[in-house]
Image: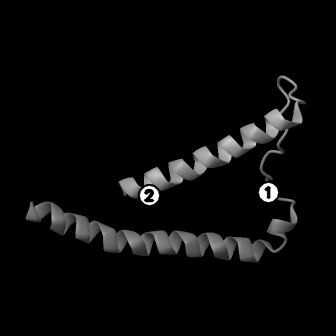
Amino acid sequence: MLMVILAVGTKLQSILTKMALEITERHAVIQGIPLREPLYEYKINSCFHDNMKLVILKLVLGVGVLILCSYITLPLYALLSQVR
């Protein structure tokens, strides 16, 4: 787990360093105005949500998978906590 956190942190650090180098190369830094566009936002009217039945199905499947995973994780946690 620690290795994954370190790997992700290292990757984010390299991305931030590349962005900082790009900004300094442009010499067009204006205070308060980011040079990068923010992430896209998917609103209820976007094309991402064209078919509302499909959106509801995805939500139900996602909740179902979470419940199934909890049925696996909770007994394993209970068993492992009793072993120690």
Q: Earlier in the sequence, mark 1 or mark 2?
A: 2
Residue 15 % position (x, y): 66, 48
Nearer the camera: disc 1 or disc 2: 2
The front one of 56 and 30 is 30
Q: Mark 1: few, some, or many residues within 10 Å (few <14, many ≥20)? A: few
Residue 69 % position (x, y): 40, 72
Residue 27 % position (x, y): 88, 30
Residue 73 is tagged as none
Q: Label 1, label 2: how many angstroms apart (C-alpha)?
A: 29 Å
SS category of the residue bearing label 1: loop
Q: Residue at x 80, y 67 (%)?
A: 49
Q: Is residue 42 left or right of residue 79?
A: right
Tag 1: amino acid: Tyr
Instruction: Say above or below: 10 vs 20.
Output: below
Q: Which residue is mark 2?
A: 4
Q: Is residue 10 left or right of residue 39?
A: left
Q: Residue at x 73, y 37 (%)?
A: 20
SS category of the residue bearing label 2: helix
Q: Are marks 1 and 2 in contact (CB under 8 Å)?
A: no
Residue 83 % position (x, y): 9, 65
Tag 2: amino acid: Val
Q: Residue at x 82, y 25 (%)?
A: 32
Q: Which residue is mark 1?
A: 42
Q: Residue furthest top?
A: 31
